[in-house]
Amino acid sequence: MPYQIVAADGTLQILHGVNPPDPDKLYNLIEIPLTRPLGPGESFAGEAALPVKTLRDHYGERPAPAGLLHGTIHVRCEVGWGTTAITAAERNRMSIQQLLAWQQLVGFGPFDVVLR
């Protein structure tokens, strides 16, 4: 992570979390990530370099649209989190639908980024 996804409105979504799978694709295996709680006073921070020539989400990679490689782009940042940790034992029993129901998203944006 982070994943880079193009939203329906053309916004580049930077996601630390899991996005829903493409309903038109059949996946043989979907990895459920392990998670851990943050300790008292602990925080989470991440970085994403722009522009990216290849967009990557939880399920694969694809070339970035030309419009996201230069000029002004709209960016939204999102973080997925849950109130309980996902342990190795729980991961083996959890489906992607259960993971998406567990995950809560918080975000910021969109905001403009000028690529030169």
Image (spheres, grey):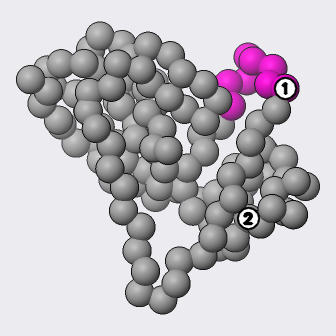
Give the residue at mark 2: 86
Residue type indicated by callout 2: Ile
Query: Which residue occupies 40% across, 74% down?
Result: 43
Instruction: Decide if residue 11 is on the left or right side of residue 111.
Output: right
The residue carrying mark 1 is 28
Residue 84 is situated, as x and y percent measured from the top left of the image, at: 70, 73
Q: Residue furthest bottom?
A: 40
Is residue 33 found left or right of 115 in the rendered image? right
56 in the magenta segment: no
Q: Is 64 located above or below residue 72 in the figure?
A: above
Q: Nearer the viewer, residue 96 or 43?
A: 43
Q: Tell which circle, 2 or 1, labels the residue nearer the N-terminal end.
A: 1
Amino acid residing under circle 1: Asn
Percent x, y for residue 60?
A: 60, 25
Identify the residue at image location x=18%, y=37%: 112
Q: Which residues are magenta?
A: 21-28
